[in-house]
Amino acid sequence: MHDAFAMGINEYLAAGGYPKIREFRGEPVRFQEYVRDSIIEPVLSKDILLLHPVNKPALLRRLFEFSCYHTAEVVSLQKMLGQLTDRGNVTTIADYLHLLSKAFLIAPIQKYSREILRIRASSPKLIVMAQALVSSVRNAQAKTITGTPELFGRLAENAVGAALIRMAENNGGEVFYWRERDLEVDYILKFGEKVLAIEVKSGRTKETHSGLSIFLTRNKQAAGLVITNAKLKGQKSLSLQDFLLAPEQILEKR
């Protein structure tokens, strides 16, 4: 997108990589209408129904919208159920998340653990697999992202997560997050016994990253990386733009 359309980082975080944007440059509202009408609606109302019967289509739609508003957040299934207006249960929510995942809309990643049962029982972190899906649901535009640090941070973390998931799928790896009480690492990229812990910092950042430091102390085989535009001491780092231009380069840092 940078080479083809001279797209900057803010526009990429808002619009993502749909080539169709070529027809809507300078018209973000029309582009978002296109995404909602020509991509989101057909997938939710037609494509997913070919994968599996959906008894509560309104709940499926609300769950997708919920994921876009809570992108790159760890949310328990019980909390999702409590915030959705349509009746359902935790099992239904889990099934519909799986359908959204099979349709390549949402990727719920699990908490990193050496015990498989703890992984399966963890609350998912919701990653939306295309930036335009998030911004179209939330009506977010490139010009407003800079003035909204929290939204910029969420979109940046989501973009990194989606790129990591695609890269892991293509190279036989897995993506998790790690959390223990108030300590967290945004992403754990795992290839066999090799582990790379990744923290995303989109704004000003301190030189200490307590969650990352604790994780690396407890997992001696793991390497660490901070994706940030700030200059750091004592920790490998990469700018957000450099990462998005060539995500595969971090495989060399494993």
Image (cartoon, rainbow, N blue to C red):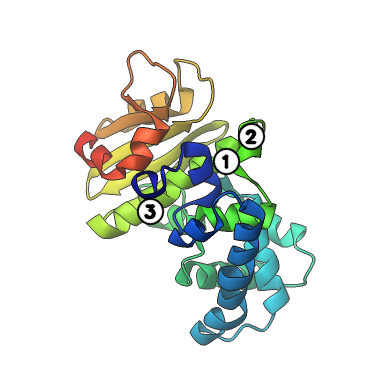
- Helix, strand or loop for disc 2: helix
Q: In which quarter of the image is residue 249?
A: top left
Identify the amino acid type marked 3.
Ile
Instruction: Give the number of the disc on residue 154.
Output: 1
Residue named by callout 2: 150
- Give above or below for 232 relative to 178: above
Q: Earlier in the sequence, mark 1 or mark 3?
A: 1
Residue drawn 48% across and 67% down? 101
Look at the numbered discs 3 and 2 and tell me whether their residues touch, using CB distance below 8 Å.
Answer: no
Query: Residue 95: x percent and y percent?
Result: 56, 73
Distance Cα–Cα, label 3 vs label 2: 22 Å
Identify the amino acid type marked 2.
Glu
Q: Earlier in the sequence, mark 3 or mark 2?
A: 2
Look at the numbered discs 2 and 1 and tell me whether their residues touch, using CB distance below 8 Å.
Answer: yes
Viewer-nearest of labels 3 and 2?
2
- Give above or below for 113 relative to 196: below
- Give above or below for 241 relative to 206: below
Query: Residue 75: x percent and y percent?
Result: 61, 51
Residue 25 placement, left or right of 62: left
Instruction: Give the number of the disc on residue 165.
Output: 3
Residue drawn 66% across and 64% down? 63
Residue 54 visible at all: yes
Identify the amino acid type marked 1.
Arg
